[in-house]
Amino acid sequence: MIGALAAALLAGLLASAAVPAVNAAPPSPARFDFAATPGVLSRNVVPQRYELLLQLDPKLETFDGEVTIHLRLDRPMAQIELHAQGLESRGARIVSAGGARRGLQVQPDSARSTWRLVPEDGGMVTAGEHRVELRWRGRVQRTGEGLFRVDHRVLGQPARMLATQLQAIHARTLLPVFDEPVFRAVFDVAVRAPSELEVVSNMPRTERLRGERGIDLHRFAPTPPMPAYLLALAVGRFDVLEDRLGDLPLRMLTAPGKREQARFAMQSTRALLPWFADLFGQPPPMPKLDQLAVPGTREGAMEDWGLISYAEELLLYDPGRSAPDSRRTVFALIAHELSHQWFGNLVSIASWNELWLNEAFATWMEHKASERFHPEWQPALLRRARLDAVMELDAGPATRAVRPGPVAEARVAEVFDGITYLKGAALLAMLESWLGEGVMQRGLAAYVAERRLAPATAGDLWHHLGQAAGRDVSAVATSWTDQPGMPLVEADASCVDGRTQLRLRQSRLLLPGAPDATPASPTLWRIPLRVARGDETRALLLEAAESRVELAGCDARPLLVNAGGAGWLRVSYSPALLARLHPAFVQLPTVDRMVLLSDSFALLQSGRLAPAAYLRLLAQLPTLHDASRAPLFSLALQHLDYLDDALFGSPAQARLRAAGRALLGPELARLGWSPRVGEDAAVGRLRGELIERLAAFDDSAVLAEAQARLVDLLGGSRRGAQASIRASVLKAVGTQANEAEFRALLTGLRNSEDDEDRGMYAAALAAGRHPGRAARLLEEAVGGRLPSGTATSLPGLVAGQPELAELAYAFSQRHFDALARLSGSLAMGQRPWLLPGAVGNSNDAALAERMAAEQRRRLGDAGVAAAARVLAQVRQRAALREREAGPLAAALEGWIPLR
């Protein structure tokens, strides 16, 4: 059907009178060119193979390594430069193709994180094939990057493993290496490790030689050519869940005692791999697939080729203990990382400027996989709610383009964000809706086949999609990927000579609140749109600043712009069109209800829609009686949470909370506190959200019920405190915990043996508003008892309560050095977010401005992006309070949800 709509566009369905012509579009990105790819290292030295031997022992703080790098010089060179950071050289020499050996001086350059290898005899290194042999000693990291140690507990006893996280620029902390994505080379890996431990890497092990002194040698098959950041290793004791998919061995590796929690992940993997292979026209690229659950230290997940690693709570699912929504999270993340085995690994990016080619695609694939395998989760509706926060960012002054231009190595972390992941994925979905699913799939299959085992750029992708579509895809796509921001489409209609004249105008949407919020005049977007009126649907490509579309007849049926919600845009309807839409809200298609509610809130944020108009939609939610009810209530909770933070300190906040209780309390009573057999997954998710938000809104009945269930929870009983609401009940108790309850929750945090429980207790403790107890919780961040990820998250969690933001910020400023040591490097760790995160959900612009100044003082340019984003968000909340507190209070006077 989508393909037919796109064809209809070419047949001339769009009858538009364009006013000004479109501005000059961003230039089409070039196809891959090795020599022209940006980077630090010379393109005249090309690595081909690494023969790597590492000596690893989790008990030690250091490790030893040696490597032979087979490389090619395209011209004579006075020196060879490669990346190395924090490594101590133990010897270096170069061996020519003829066998001549020459010593090398190692000259570290800390500013570039490189070693310059200079022949000791002062001569040139000739063009041609050479071997560079290096030995070194390195340090094991403690912060989830490079080669890092993982301290955890198994049945109450201390345990330790080693694991790696080399993306984006941490391969250089493990070995001297050409650590830029453009360099693909074979890795031939061997590891010496204590005999009682297991060692895993990207490829299958080919040999294990028992040593005489309790040290075994593990050899692994050579990898295909790949970027250095995809190299992976782990050393430790693991439980293993095994399976096969045809000839492909599958394994889930967990800490001892947790293997059974990986069964859902294994089932998901078995379903997804054949689907991806068919979709991309390529079998799984590696001869085995391991997936590793890392307890405690690492953040997120990493798609290392053949050995994917995850933070433990993102891979494991315990039906008796995990929240139901954990299944959705686990499935989505597995889909994301598995799709990377093709997008990102088999075909890699030329440079970090093109990160979106990895992450936007994997995010888009996780969305498509959820729709394919778990439609009962209503992924399209839940995804809309996730997009709101990123759309808010994109409508502010601190956004950037999906393809951001040159990305300095020290600031790579800045592009691992919602703009890359969620906006990028939404743009791919929008292109698919325009081109048609079949065209999109053919273009992607051709792209993967042609760029297999090679780097790629956006120019390569647009080339293959354009070939499949038979049209200029690049011009449309780059108007979205290569400029920042998002369009606002204003829609109005009138009846002229018995036909409807729809007028559409596009401009850049900007939220108020920042003095620098006026952008330079942007290139217009080429906007694929669907316009719907009843069962009549039109496909448009809106290219000019203003267009007119003619529809047959004139009637009062509601008219939808961006029908189906595929467009990355906001729609502002004229009062006349809104007057048709609002009464028909409950009859609209489910996604269109979500889009209308989402757009209405965004327009309220920007001052373009009166609060009363938004509240008219909100009042209708209890009248819905289909599957969209729970996701729409979840979206409304998100909006109410934002308003509660924005209105903090104003009289309107109390009125908002009373209205929230009136809307949400009956909904929780309708659902009850116990799950029902066969209930929708979105309903289970909503139940927990209602409990948490009603507690935050001081609902006495919910607080009393949660406190009554606390004894069962802390005692380990499942009676009255089901797994599905365990985290929500604890968080509800935490909002107004007394001293005994606070101590009980704190004990739970300190004694937890897995990440899911630690996160649950941390969130519960941080939900409180008592300054003295919040200060005690913050001290846990630097107390040495918690894993680094949990510890550094505490100030941001505490600052989630606006009244405690000043406290959390002062703590983070005072303990910045200690938190920075826990947070990892500036390039990819959480360090740039320590101070901005501690401002939390505040609406205090003065606090945010102090934070931004302190951030620049401490981190310089590397901290600007994070500070600017939070500063813009705080200013937006402050502007909303100043502008809307009075109108909202008036609109909420006597407001009653419909029943």
Image: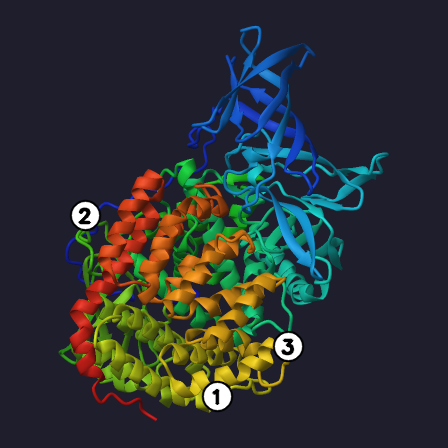
Residue 399, visible in the rendered structure: no
Task: Name, please, the residue furthest toward the left.
Answer: 497
Looking at the image, which is closer to me, 868 or 428? 868
Query: Label 1 sits on what residue type?
Result: Leu
The label nearer to you, 2 versus 3, is: 3
Q: In which quarter of the image is the N terminus?
A: bottom left
Q: How far apart, in angstroms, are the residues tagged by discs 1 and 2? A: 50 Å
- Circle 1 is placed at which residue position? 671
Classify mark 2: residues with Cα within 10 Å, few (<14), some (14-19) or many (20+).
few
Give percent across and percent down for residue 829. Answer: 47, 46
- Circle 3 is placed at which residue position? 716
Looking at the image, which is closer to me, 266 or 769? 769
Residue 620, visible in the rendered structure: yes
Q: How far apart, in angstroms, are the residues tagged by discs 1 and 3? A: 24 Å
Q: Residue at x 35, y 78 (%)?
A: 593
- Circle 2 is placed at which residue position? 520
Q: Which residue is drawn at 49% across and 49% down?
A: 358
Query: Label 3 sits on what residue type?
Result: Gly
Helix, strand or loop at label 3? It is loop
Helix, strand or loop at label 2? It is loop
Query: Label 2 sits on what residue type?
Result: Ala
Earlier sequence position, callout 1 versus callout 3:
1
The label nearer to you, 1 versus 3, is: 3
Quadrant assignment, res 898: bottom left
Earlier sequence position, callout 1 versus callout 2:
2
Q: How far apart, in angstroms, are the residues tagged by discs 2 and 3? A: 59 Å
Give percent across and percent down for residue 767. Answer: 42, 70
Helix, strand or loop at label 1? It is helix
Judge whether 367 appears above or below 299 on screen.
Answer: below
Classify mark 1: residues with Cα within 10 Å, few (<14), some (14-19) or many (20+).
some
Q: Residue at x 20, y 60 (%)?
A: 512
Quadrant assignment, res 459: top left
